[in-house]
Amino acid sequence: MARVHESIVVSAPISDVFDLIADYRRALEWMEGFSRFDLMPGPSKGVGARVRAAGTFLGFTLETELEIVEYERPYRLVSRSTGPIKALTTWLLSQDESGTRVSFAGDYSLPLALRLAGDRAFEQVVAGQIRRSLVNLQRLC
């Protein structure tokens, strides 16, 4: 199991930051490594909302389905993904003296081909993408 944890402080109100993170239509503006987010049938936000996402990872194009499994506006958003890389990712937001602290935690179950490369190598690549995504989020806010 690979794990990634990153955080940043964003100079914006917590509800604005949460709404940006939760809006699949704006995800390409700040999420690194993704090229598509398409809403699937069902709710468009909150628990049960699903998107099909596509992106590149280590030069490979991957698709996954993300489903929101916890939605506590404006503090917590948890999604589960299926596909070659299975993940449970959590976005936690809290008030900070200089804005909103945004923390990301991801637990990833890797297919055999990526496990051979090692969890640590995977963690480093994903952590880099998440750090760049958080900086992009900070810039947007």
Image (cartoon, rainbow, N blue to C red):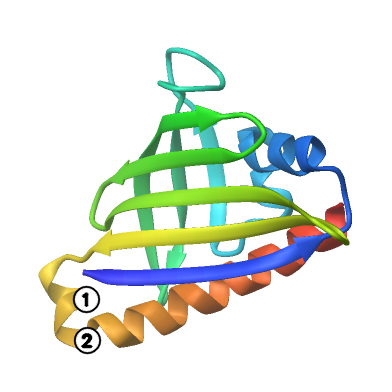
Q: Nearer the viewer, residue 55 or 67?
A: 67
Q: Is residue 23 left or right of residue 112?
A: right
Q: From the top left corner, tell me how far across and down residue 127 is, in percent.
A: 50, 75
Q: Which residue lies furthest to the left in this view?
A: 112
Placement of 108 over or under 122, stated as above or below: above
Q: Residue furthest front?
A: 97
Residue denoted by label 2: 117
Q: Which of 53 and 59 is in front in this view?
A: 53
Q: In this view, does 97 lie to the left or right of 119?
A: right
Q: From the top left corner, tell me how far across and down residue 60 is, in percent.
A: 37, 69
| Amino acid type, mark 2 | Ala
Tag 1, which secondary structure? helix
Tag 2, which secondary structure? helix
Q: Quadrant of the N terminus?
A: bottom left
Q: From the top left corner, tell me how far across and down residue 27 is, in percent.
A: 65, 45
Q: Are marks 2 and 1 in contact (CB under 8 Å)?
A: yes
* Label drawn at residue 114: 1
Report the residue at 77% width, 42% height from top: 14
As measured in the structure, the alpha-carbon distance from the residue carrying label 2 to the one carrying label 1 is 5 Å
Q: From the top left corner, tell me how far across and down residue 80 is, in percent.
A: 34, 42
| Amino acid type, mark 1 | Leu
